[in-house]
Amino acid sequence: MFDYWKDTHDLVTPNHALITHIIWPQFRAVQILTIRNYYASPTSDA
């Protein structure tokens, strides 16, 4: 995002570029796996 901001000096354009370039199904899959691993991991009650 910094490269886009450096060229445009605008915050809307980099955010729009980021949103349009995200591969949404892969992004959601990573979120689901991260949450699942977080709740499945044993916690230490030390």
Image (tube, rainbow, N blue to C red):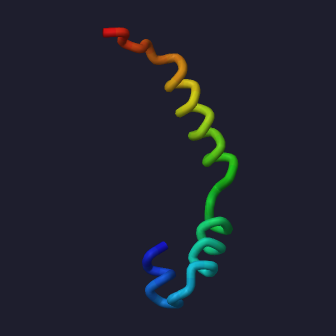
Residue appearing at x 67%, y 68% in the figure = 20
| Location of residue 42 with respect to 23 vertically, above or below | above
Q: In this view, does 14 lie to the left or right of 46?
A: right
Image quarter hosting the C terminus: top left
Q: Nearer the viewer, residue 29 or 14?
A: 14
Seen as rendered, the residue at the extreme front is: 46
**Could you say where residue 38 lies in the image, as x and y percent from the top left?**
50, 25
Dividing the picture into quadrants, the one containing residue 39 is top right
Q: 44 or 31: which is nearer to us?
A: 44
State the image coordinates of residue 42 (x, y, percent, origin top left). Answer: 43, 13
Q: How many numbered circles are shown? A: 0
Q: Residue, x 61% and y 48% (percent of image)? A: 27
Viewer-proximal residue, 28 or 9? Answer: 9
Which residue occupies the extreme left position in the image?
46
Residue at the outermost top position: 45
Image height of 28 relative to 1, above or below: above
In the picture provided, is 38 more to the left or to the right than 32? left
Residue 4 placed where, x, y %?
A: 50, 81
Q: Residue at x 64, y 56 (%)?
A: 23
* Vertical comparison of 18 with 5: above or below: above
- The residue at the point 49 percent across, 82 percent down is 5
Rendered position, 33 above or below 41: below
Identify the image quadrant of residue 17.
Answer: bottom right
